[in-house]
Amino acid sequence: PGINHIAVADNALKEDGFYTGINTDDTTLFTSDLSQEYYEIASAFEMSEEEIRKIAIRVADDIFDDSYKEELKLRMSKY
């Protein structure tokens, strides 16, 4: 297997206090929803389900209010 460049970049960014997130903001224009974005990135960079799951759970901390975060992260960890 090759080098997982996303994981390498993600680790380097974390050391500087940043992290990687995956998102989409115009599903109509680009005909790709968030699930498709995760799939394409995971496929292109040979990422494991666990690597994708960690990114998704970490992003949940920033985009949802506190009352929903823990429930969402628990749900996401089951997939």
Image (spheres, grey):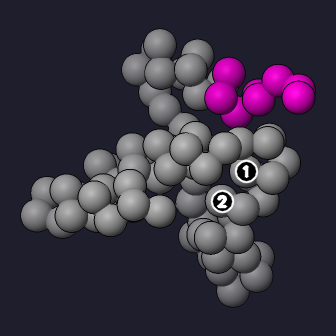
Along the line of sight, the residue nearer the viewer: 4 or 9: 4
Looking at this view, name the residue that lies furthest to the left. Answer: 67
Q: Are marks 1 and 2 in contact (CB under 8 Å)?
A: yes
Is residue 10 shown left or right of residue 45?
Answer: left
Give the quarter of the image for residue 30.
Answer: bottom right
Task: Name the image quarter holding residue 60.
Answer: bottom left
Q: Horizontal and vertical percent for residue 56?
A: 47, 52
Whether 15 is drawn above or below 1: the answer is above
- What's the distance in space between the residues labelled 1 and 2, CA to CA? 6 Å
Residue 64 in sight in this render: no
Q: Residue at (32%, 50%) from the top-left corner?
A: 62
Q: Is residue 5 left or right of residue 64?
A: right
Percent from the top left, x then y, of residue 68?
18, 66
**Dot 2: few (<14), some (14–19), or many (≥20) neighbours within 10 Å?**
many
Question: Is residue 51 visible in this depiction of the protein?
Answer: yes
Q: Quarter of the image for the N terminus: give it.
A: top right
* Amino acid type, label 2: Tyr
Q: What mark, if any, has residue 42 been given in the picture?
A: 1
| Residue topped by disc 2 | 38
Instruction: Give SS at disc 2.
Output: helix
Specify start and end residues of the magenta stretch as a single range.
1-8
